[in-house]
């Protein structure tokens, strides 16, 4: 077994440039899931992936239709029924990206500078799930077989909280059945401290619109007796927060499981100083609930963020209107036992109760996702730690992720199997931001680690 | 004199359709002053106007360069030096307009429906100042002369508070010297109650930007310890207002001249009921300082309005970012003795003092304009009232306008001459809003009234 693994590792080292060329092909497809104008690009990306998996010799490699964006499936079961089966999940949809957001290079034309790939999707998640595909390829091409069975499930709606994937997974439980699920869609603080994420925050994402006059009004003719919808929105949003940065919505914190001392100690292993936070983000000072450390606030505590705000005129120069409408996108990151639908109801209620009678307010749920927590003493989790030591070169920490991968809680519940989040990105890769990037050396280390992990899983007692 | 005036009135009645065709030519020019992309259209409009005035036989008809948008000047001094001279001001710049704002017809392709012209600029101000040009034309074509001398000054920066016009007017005081200034850029509540505006609100228009992280951040990775710039902006704006709709900025009301009982009685002559306000605007309820009537709030009291608000993502679906920036456009309408620069300093100070140390805030002044108040017992004002009776068919009221025409206070100060604001629009014409419109019958009545006013001015004792 060791011999095969070493052959696969050598194959991967020898083929890095071709792997990158292939990844770049995919990064050039602007698979922006949220934008209906990119529907054809989403399909093109799915077809590219299905063809790629088929080309590596996987069976059942195909594009799978859903009520939303297509899925991609493919499997290699050559290890035989007495071997473990690994289900590998990834997502090919990416966040919106445009030069005017502040990109220095075209977001869909991958550009290498100083060993770093700049492209939308480079780290989230195309670059990361491609690592898993290339790990399997390395086994198959170098030795003709992998030590375990592997199934791939790649979706196109992760950034929209996987509305089509969840029902499809429930319906295809038998096809997907596996002993362990692996996801590479998370990140670490530094190359020297790789991280296995054992917890993710859930999500409630909504949109609210305040409507006043039928149309924009001349502020000179109507100003003074018209409740400006932008001001009404400001007043409503102001009531959702306390002055100390905590959330003022009644009941919001009710179901948050308190952090244990052991958990706080684990989180403290990867400290985030205020200085580091300020250097990484560029903010002039940190903010938030002073009862928790910065690391705790960004991973183990719930949040409520304004993701977008719009009203009236934002072009150059003055325009003296009272806007007819004002809108906001709001999302909460959830932890512990918070239920995303219950939280939506609480936020909605707080907004409507704060709305004055001088305007009309509408609230719409956009997406939800469950929080997830996987015990880190499971054998499959410990095997992942050994794989990092052997393949990456550093001992990993188990950490809580602040982000949300909606399918994680679903897979864990459905399969009764551990979901192992071996993230190969850096926290500072700029995911969801302009100039998203990914280090080539991390791509290489990732493939090495993913190869070793399949070997580690094969060696676990049955 | 009456005979000439009647001939001019008959000429105007006979030429309405051609006058409209000419107006439509000008309405098709998208002279959006605020947008640098329309700079060529601004020039085209100015050249069109200069050529039009020259074609009517005016002297010195020309485009005048300034540090900003060009002015248009033209004069007819054929009445002779012993006759009065009238300076007529108008503006050819219009507010931005785009179909996606809610226009039902293209804003720069004038469309007639049920006797109403729909086009940007139809009432504000192309349709209105064109009335004055056509009134002079009617005298010149029907009888070869007008009863008074007439000078036209048409600018392209009114919507930007006339930054270039004011210094130019000061430098060209002799050229512009007149006994009375006439402006048609205001409106009335109903055709049956024409209005002569004797007061205008001033203006302070500014922009503020809140900056947090260098770039948009992933809300899962950084949320909880980053002060969201959109939230910080919400907090800052919330501190500028009291819960009762009054303005909380220290010193804001200090220089507001109290309304006298006589002024309140005059304002009450054109009452605005809550029902009328709601019907005209579509708001579910009126708002504002309960110590004043609705009519007083929208014309004789100062305001502070949010004209635009922007931050983060406003496209379809979710995007889980913490925006790097949040911005706002704010304008105050000023009355009585409020000084627009002093008010800017007060607003700026209030914003900066409300800004938390977790973000950076920048405030920029965009434009200012002085408030104006003209006594309505002056002979030239009373002559305007008689002109409405004879030309429009209804007795006018003297009213306070809620809007701002920056040059009014300047002309009154400089010329030591009354500025007579004979507005030919309706309050509900949708100026600055989508589907701006103007009634053809008001265009016709306006020309009749403008013709008669020149006659009334000629009859005033020297």
Image (cartoon, coloured by chain):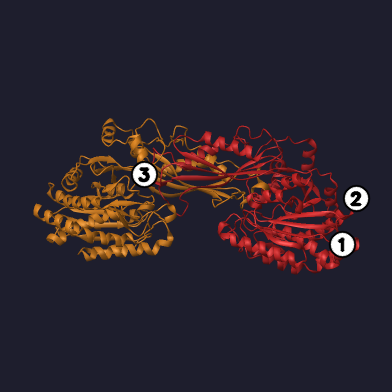
Chain colours: A orange, B red
Can residue A451 be seen in this snapshot? yes
Q: Nearer the viewer, residue B301 or A186?
A: B301
Question: Mark 1: which secondary structure?
Answer: helix
Residue A435 picture location, percent across and down:
36, 52
The reply to whether discs 2 and 1 touch (Cβ–Cβ < 8 Å) is no
Both on one chain, marks 2 and 1?
A: yes
Query: Quick one: label 2 or label 1, which is nearer the N terminus?
Result: 1
Can residue A373 be seen in this snapshot? no
Q: Which residue is mark 2?
A: B461
Q: Which of the two discs, 2 and 1, sits closer to the camera?
A: 2
Q: Give the residue at x 57% y 36%.
A: B240
Question: Mark 3: which secondary structure?
Answer: helix
Q: CA distance from mark 1 to mark 3?
A: 75 Å
* Image position of A47 with respect to A259: above or below: below
Neighbor class of circle 3 (other Cα within 10 Å; few <14, some 14-19, many 20+) is: many
The reply to whether discs 1 and 3 touch (Cβ–Cβ < 8 Å) is no
Neighbor class of circle 1 (other Cα within 10 Å; few <14, some 14-19, many 20+) is: many
Q: Which mark is residue A332?
A: none
Return the chain for callout 3: B
Q: CA distance from mark 2 to mark 1?
A: 18 Å
Q: Which residue is mark 3?
A: B220
* Image position of A314 with respect to B57: above or below: above
Q: Which residue is mark 1?
A: B5
Return the chain for callout 2: B
Q: Which of the two discs, 2 and 3, sits closer to the camera?
A: 2
Query: Quick one: label 1 or label 3, which is nearer the N terminus?
Result: 1
Neighbor class of circle 2 (other Cα within 10 Å; few <14, some 14-19, many 20+) is: few
Residue A86 picture location, percent across and down:
21, 53
The reply to whether discs 2 and 3 touch (Cβ–Cβ < 8 Å) is no
Return the chain for callout 1: B
Q: Is residue A172 left or right of residue B293?
A: left
Residue A338 picture location, percent across and down:
37, 40
């Amino acid at each position: 077994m060791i011999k095969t693994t070493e052959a696969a590792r050598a194959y991967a080292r020898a083929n890095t440039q071709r792997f990158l060329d292939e990844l770049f092909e995919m990064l050039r497809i602007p698979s922006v899931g949220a934008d209906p104008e990119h529907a054809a690009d989403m399909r093109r990306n799915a077809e590219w992936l299905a063809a790629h998996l088929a080309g590596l010799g996987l069976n059942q490699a195909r594009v799978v239709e859903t009520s939303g964006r297509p899925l991609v499936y493919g499997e290699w079961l050559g290890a035989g029924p007495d071997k473990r089966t690994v289900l590998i999940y990834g997502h090919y949809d990416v966040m919106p990206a445009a030069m005017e957001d502040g990109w220095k290079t075209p977001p869909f034309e991958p550009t290498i500078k100083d060993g770093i790939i700049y492209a939308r999707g480079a780290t989230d998640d195309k670059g990361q799930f491609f690592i898993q595909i290339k790990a399997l390829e390395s086994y198959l091409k170098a030795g003709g077989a992998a030590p375990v069975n592997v199934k791939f499930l790649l979706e196109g709606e992760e950034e929209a909280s996987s509305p089509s994937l969840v029902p499809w997974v429930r319906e295809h439980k038998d096809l997907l059945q596996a002993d362990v699920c692996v996801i590479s869609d998370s990140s670490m603080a530094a190359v020297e401290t790789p991280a296995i994420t054992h917890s993710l925050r859930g999500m409630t994402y909504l949109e609210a619109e305040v409507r006043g006059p039928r149309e924009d009004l001349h502020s000179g003719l109507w100003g003074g007796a018209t409740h400006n919808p932008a001001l009404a929105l400001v007043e409503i949003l102001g009531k959702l927060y306390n002055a100390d940065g905590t959330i003022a919505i009644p009941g919001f914190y009710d179901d948050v499981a308190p952090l244990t001392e052991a958990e706080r100690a684990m989180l403290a292993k990867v400290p985030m100083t205020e200085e580091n936070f300020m250097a990484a983000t560029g903010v002039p000072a940190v903010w938030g609930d002073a009862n928790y450390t910065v690391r705790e606030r960004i991973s183990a505590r719930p949040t409520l963020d304004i993701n977008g705000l719009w009203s009236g005129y934002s072009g150059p120069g003055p325009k003296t209107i009272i806007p007819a409408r004002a809108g906001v996108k709001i999302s909460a990151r959830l932890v512990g036992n918070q239920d995303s639908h219950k939280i939506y109801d609480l936020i909605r209620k707080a907004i409507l109760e704060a709305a004055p009678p001088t305007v009309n307010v509408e609230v719409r749920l956009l997406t939800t996702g469950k929080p997830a927590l996987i015990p880190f003493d499971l054998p499959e989790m410990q095997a992942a730690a050994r794989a990092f030591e052997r393949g990456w070169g550093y001992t990993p920490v188990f950490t809580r992720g602040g982000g949300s991968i909606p399918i994680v809680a679903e897979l864990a519940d459905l399969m009764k199997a551990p979901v192992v989040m071996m993230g190969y990105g850096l926290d500072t890769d700029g995911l969801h931001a302009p100039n998203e990037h990914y280090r080539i050396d991390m791509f290489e280390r990732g493939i090495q680690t993913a190869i070793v992990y399949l070997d580690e899983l094969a060696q676990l007692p049955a």
